Image (spheres, rainbow, N blue to C red):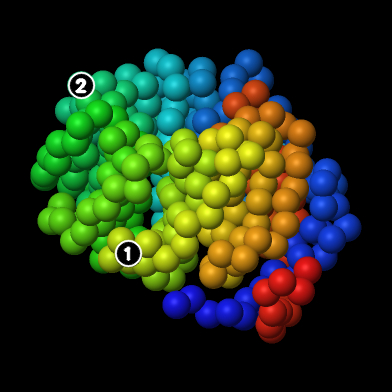
């Protein structure tokens, strides 16, 4: 059972939730991606830059709301984009079925070809040796860093999400048929469960001890690293749970109703922010949990502060 205390809880978020329980706090930064919805947003490892993936096929790098680099990475939707650990490279998965590796200046470094439909998700093992990809063609594939396919795992329907644990000891696959698999880096199955609903959001905790999924059914579910369900929370009033993010001690969810909800690791609801952005497509904590970025399908990106901490806070005290 997860602890009943929020050790090191983010008091900044707790205080902001009290003061701004409905409308959310004033943002640190707000900008619009021109002529494009945003499907994914992520921080650079040092937390100084953001990268977005858009409905126009572009990968864009931003600093303080200013566009630094724009890459026409795919023909249409960029479903996921991430920084690699060195902060100098980006990996993107797109509607054209190709996964591409880029320098942050926009130079194409490597392509990973093999999917026969849209590449929906991508994750790189921390040591840089293995890449995993998911696709509308129903397959999950593992690749070497030089673009050689290592393994293929077939599912029925779209594979919605793939994510490596930070320590690289396992990865998670979510599929359109509702299945949630935990696998070894070589693709071997550790466990498989099916809560009966397709998954939209997927995130793994920074310490790799658990992961969370958000569903089309309006549920947030938290699992341990072997795929045993620990928490199931209905937030059906939010519509789809499109995005999930972890800090070191909080879980955040982004939903179709434009709200961000905050939860303790043990499932205690801490509060809700109404962003007013419409359908939220992606959220992410900055490394260290000092900021939270929220992106909408309408193309708006907003950064909020969440920086002050204290040693412990009991659940239910907000």
Q: Could you tell me how far apart the alpha carbons at marks 1 and 2 are, in whole angstroms?
A: 32 Å
Q: The C terminus is located in which quarter?
A: bottom right
Picture layout, residue 130 above or below residue 157: below
Q: The N terminus is located in which quarter?
A: bottom left
Which one is in front, 122 or 106?
122
Which one is in front, 303 or 129?
303
| Residue located at (68% from left, 36% from top) | 258
* Residue 124 in sight from this viewpoint: no
Residue bearing the label numbered 1: 228
Residue bearing the label numbered 2: 116
Displayed quadrant of residue 299: top right
On the image, the x and y values in percent for residue 239 come to 58, 35
Which one is in front, 221 or 164?
221
Question: First in sequence: mark 1 or mark 2?
Answer: 2
Which one is in front, 13 or 71?
13
Q: Nearer the viewer, mark 1 or mark 2?
A: 1
Numbered marks: total: 2
Displayed quadrant of residue 106: top left
| Residue located at (61% from left, 61% from top) | 263
Picture layout, residue 256 above or below residue 208: above
* Residue 291 in sight from this viewpoint: yes
Q: Is residue 111 left or right of residue 108?
A: left
| Residue located at (21% from left, 59% from top) | 191
On the image, the x and y values in percent for residue 60 come to 55, 31
Q: Is residue 190 left or right of residue 247?
A: left
On the image, the x and y values in percent for residue 120 come to 35, 32
């Amino acid at each position: 059972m997860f602890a009943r205390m929020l050790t090191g809880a983010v008091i900044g978020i707790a205080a902001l939730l009290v003061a701004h329980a409905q409308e959310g706090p004033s943002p640190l930064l707000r900008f619009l991606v021109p002529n494009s919805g945003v499907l994914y947003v992520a921080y650079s490892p040092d937390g100084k830059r953001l990268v977005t993936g858009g409905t126009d096929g572009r990968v864009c790098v931003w600093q303080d709301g200013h566009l630094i680099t724009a890459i026409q990475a795919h023909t249409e939707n960029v479903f996921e984009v991430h920084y690699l650990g060195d902060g100098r490279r980006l990996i993107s998965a797109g509607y054209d079925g190709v996964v591409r590796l880029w320098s942050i200046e926009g130079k194409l470094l490597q392509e990973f070809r093999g999917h026969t439909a849209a590449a929906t998700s991508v994750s790189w093992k921390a040591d840089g040796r293995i890449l995993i990809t998911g696709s509308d063609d129903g397959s999950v594939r593992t690749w070497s860093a030089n673009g050689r396919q290592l393994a293929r795992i077939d599912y029925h329907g779209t594979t919605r999400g793939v994510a490596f644990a930070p320590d690289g000891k396992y990865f998670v696959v979510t599929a359109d048929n509702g299945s949630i698999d935990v696998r070894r880096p070589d693709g071997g199955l550790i466990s498989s469960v099916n809560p009966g609903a397709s998954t939209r959001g997927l995130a793994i905790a920074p310490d790799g001890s658990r992961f969370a999924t958000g569903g089309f059914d309006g549920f947030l579910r938290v699992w341990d690293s072997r795929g045993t369900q620990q928490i199931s929370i209905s937030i059906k009033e939010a519509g789809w749970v499109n995005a999930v993010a972890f800090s070191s001690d909080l879980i955040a969810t982004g939903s179709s109703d434009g709200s961000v909800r905050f939860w303790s690791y043990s499932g205690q609801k801490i509060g809700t922010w109404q962003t007013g952005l419409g359908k939220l497509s992606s959220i992410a904590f900055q490394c260290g949990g000092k900021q939270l970025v929220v992106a909408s399908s309408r193309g708006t990106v907003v950064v909020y502060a969440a920086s002050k901490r204290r040693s412990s806070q009991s659940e239910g005290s907000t």
